[in-house]
Image: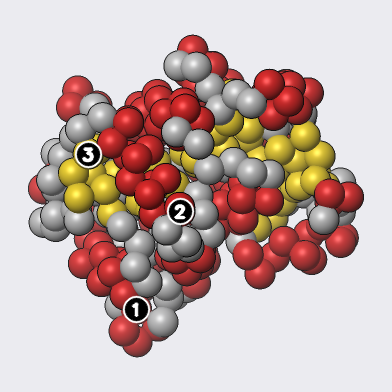
């Protein structure tokens, strides 16, 4: 297995010194934001993690290796590259074997993080059960990964383009705890609230770390969703964003957009219809998640 994994010097040093490490995905760089905003945001998020006592490890597939931590040059190259494959669980073997560039989704980042011994992963929002999934069976592999891979995922809840109720039902079936960081209500990515409650509320990073350590010490496999609401000043109005997502979904249906093309189509459409406000919100929530995630990683490291 080790022949497929390559660590950056920063992550290697962290592992040797026993420092807390936070995993970061690369799909947000290649598919989530335009250049140069993507590289700038990635660097800023990494710095927030360092400033809060942990070491960032952005994960990507480059030249037949799972890279745990990217150099500045690799980050720049990745942010500029065309035709980067979106890598989930099913794609990892193929992309490593063919040495193609691959950006890790939530599911793939969780797998790679666990292989590298990293317990905490920061992202924007998780995938979930898509609207209309009762006929399309369009359910993100992220949910299955949360059920079987021992990595806690700090996010701003589920993207509001999803069926949040069914996403929570699926997570419950799979035994995945949904923890609200300082909130009883599940945030919905661009907004601080949805119509649904979380399973448990945690008011400190230590509480989250204690829950995760107890879960894993008991031999209960799988991760957890740590739902951290977007900061109030950057949050979008719930009714405003709901209306826009409704329009975007109708257009996707009219144009016959299906499967894994749905999410990027909807996010691009939401960005256009909100005149870029959704991109600003996305950046703000990822940075906020990085701050909280670094704190949880430090607490987990202190609680081994």
Percent x, y for residue 160?
Answer: 27, 54
Q: Determine the residue located farthest toward the bottom in the rendered image.
A: 135
Residue 61 at least partly seen: yes
Give the x, y percent position of residue 61: 75, 47
Q: CA distance from mark 1 to mark 3?
A: 31 Å
- Residue of label 1: 133
Q: Which residue is mark 3?
A: 202
Disc 1 packing (10 Å; few <14; some 14–19; many ≥20) = some
Q: Is residue 162 left or right of residue 23?
A: left
Label 1, secondary structure: give it. Answer: helix
Q: Residue at x 21, y 67 (%)?
A: 165
Q: Nearer the viewer, residue 92 or 178?
A: 178
Q: Nearer the viewer, mark 1 or mark 2?
A: 2
The structure residue drawn at horizontal position 47% and vertical position 27%, both measured from the top left corner, is 302
The residues bearing labels 1 and 2 have C-alpha atoms spaced at a distance of 31 Å
Q: Residue at x 68, y 51 (%)?
A: 115
> Sequence-wise, which precedes: disc 1 or disc 3?
1
Secondary element at image label 3: strand
Report the front residue among 275 and 211. Answer: 211
Residue depicted at x 64% and y 26%: 18
Which label was assigned to residue 216?
A: 2
Q: Earlier in the sequence, mark 1 or mark 2?
A: 1
């Amino acid at each position: 297995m080790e022949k497929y994994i390559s660590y950056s010097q920063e992550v290697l040093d962290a592992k040797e010194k026993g420092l807390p490490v936070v995993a970061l995905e690369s799909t947000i760089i290649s598919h989530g934001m335009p250049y140069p905003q993507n590289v700038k945001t990635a660097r800023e998020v990494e710095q927030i993690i360092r400033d809060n006592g942990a070491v960032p490890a952005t994960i990507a597939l480059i030249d037949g290796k799972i890279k745990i931590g990217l150099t500045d040059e690799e980050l720049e190259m990745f942010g500029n590259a065309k035709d980067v494959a979106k890598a989930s669980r099913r794609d990892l073997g193929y992309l490593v074997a063919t040495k193609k560039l691959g950006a890790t989704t939530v599911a793939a980042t969780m797998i790679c993080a666990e292989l590298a011994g990293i317990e905490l992963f920061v992202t924007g929002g998780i995938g979930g059960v898509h609207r209309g999934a009762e006929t399309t069976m369009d359910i993100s592999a992220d949910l299955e990964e949360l059920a079987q891979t021992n990595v806690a995922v700090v996010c701003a809840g589920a993207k509001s383009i999803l069926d949040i109720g069914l996403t929570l039902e699926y997570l419950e079936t799979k035994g995945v705890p949904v923890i609200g960081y300082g909130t009883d209500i599940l945030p919905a990515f661009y907004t601080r609230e949805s119509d649904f409650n979380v399973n448990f509320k945690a008011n400190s990073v230590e509480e989250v770390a204690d829950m995760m350590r107890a879960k894993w010490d008991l031999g209960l496999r799988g991760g957890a969703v740590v739902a951290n609401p977007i900061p109030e000043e950057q949050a979008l109005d719930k009714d405003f964003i709901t209306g826009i997502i409704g329009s975007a979904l109708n257009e996707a249906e009219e144009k016959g957009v299906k499967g894994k093309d749905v999410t990027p189509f909807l996010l691009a459409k939401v960005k256009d219809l909100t005149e870029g406000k959704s991109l600003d919100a996305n950046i703000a929530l990822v940075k906020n998640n990085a701050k909280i995630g670094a704190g949880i990683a430090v607490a987990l490291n202190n609680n081994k």
